[in-house]
Amino acid sequence: MFEPVIEDEDINAVVSVLKSGWLAHGPVVESFEKNFAEYVGVKYAAAVSNGTVALMLSLKALGIGNGDKVLVPDYTFIATATSVLMVGATPIFVDVDYKTFNMDVDDLQKKISETNPKAIIVVHLFGHPADIKTIKDIASDKKIVLIEDAAQAHGAEAWGKKVGSFGDAAIFSFYATKNMTTGEGGIVLSDDRRVIEKVKLLRNHGQTARYIHEELGGNYRMTSIQAALGEAQLKKLDKLNEIRRKNAGLLTAKLSDLKDYVELPYEAPWAKHVYHVYALKLSSNVNRKCVVECMSAKGVETAIHYPLPLHKQPLFQKLGYKECCSNASVLAERELSLPVHPKLVDRDIDFVANAFRQCLKSCI
């Protein structure tokens, strides 16, 4: 499903840092922050240890805490919601659009009316942007803080602008499976200097001067080793995304006649999809478990993102969350991801498509 593209320039960048002796947070991190912010089109950035921490610190920096309600999509990786719990706030789940997997605007407006939230975390899932322009207008009108979770959407665009440049803050993850990686790592972006200064304070034990600590923080720093890898990865991100898009296009062309059994990934006219994963939807008459096992037997790894909507996760069931979000529940039963990562060449895509076609027909 995933294979990071690590080449000589990545290795040389890391070796250079190792030879320098400056392994922890240093100038290379600051350079990476500057370059990534410029790439996305925002003013300021603070690199941190991972994407979950980036979410938690962005919430804290924007004043979200005990008793606050935060709207999050019900269909996403759990960190979007658990980061809210980590700051003492309450996640409220919003259903998602069936076509894009992203936050449904109508249900968002309904949940705003019902819950009076202080913040919204909108996720750009699987590499396809959410309807961020509409959501930004809603948040601005209601004076609600807007955070973009772009952990899976490096380089994705909405209306010609990079995702991560719309909200009061945005986060990206650089985990090993992402479109670009630092092994582990994350970053917070904002056009508000105060937000980023707060994140930088909290990531370093609340320290304002050496051994002077004014706030409760922690060690959430990114190392220079990670940042060096990030610098090298960023330089080829657009090229690697185009390979993902090409692979996705080839797969779509080869599977487009299977509409009675599968719904292929959608790209909105205003969006640039960067295909973190190629997420399709199986029809109700297809046995997903059978397809997964059949593909594995043919040597093709698949994945289910995600087998449960968040409100059905054991953690949230223990917290008393009730049934909600019908689209999220259906997608959790029908989604299946196929590999389209940049290390795949045309013959690999042919192999994946042929295997999937055979497995689909044997699993109806």
Image (cartoon, grey):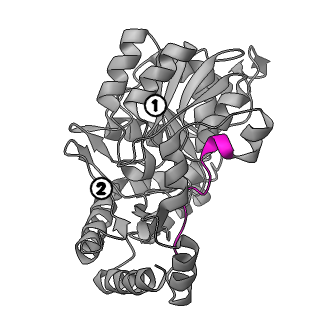
Image quadrant in which you'd find residue 209: top right
Q: CA distance from mark 1 to mark 2?
A: 19 Å
Q: Residues within 10 Å of mark 2 (few under 14, many from 20)?
A: some
Main secondary structure found in the magenta portion? loop
Where's residue 154, x and y in %?
39, 48
**Residue, x 48% and y 60% (percent of image)?**
335
Classify mark 1: helix, strand or loop. strand
Q: Is residue 317 magenta?
A: no
Where's residue 137, x and y in %?
32, 19
Looking at marks 1 and 2 on the same chain, the residue that comes earlier in the sequence is marked by: 1
Is 6 rendered above or below residue 56? below
Please say whether residue 305 is visible from this viewpoint: no
Taking the image as shown, residue 31 lies to the left or right of residue 303, namely: left
Q: Nearer the viewer, residue 236 or 274?
A: 274
Image quadrant in which you'd find residue 240: bottom left
Give the label on residue 238, or none.
2
Classify mark 2: helix, strand or loop. helix
Q: Amino acid at mark 2?
A: Asp
Is 125 rendered above or below residue 295? above
Q: Is residue 310 magenta?
A: yes
Q: Residue under circle 1?
A: 189
Residue most extreme to the front: 285
Please say whether residue 92 is visible from this viewpoint: yes
The magenta stretch is: 301-312
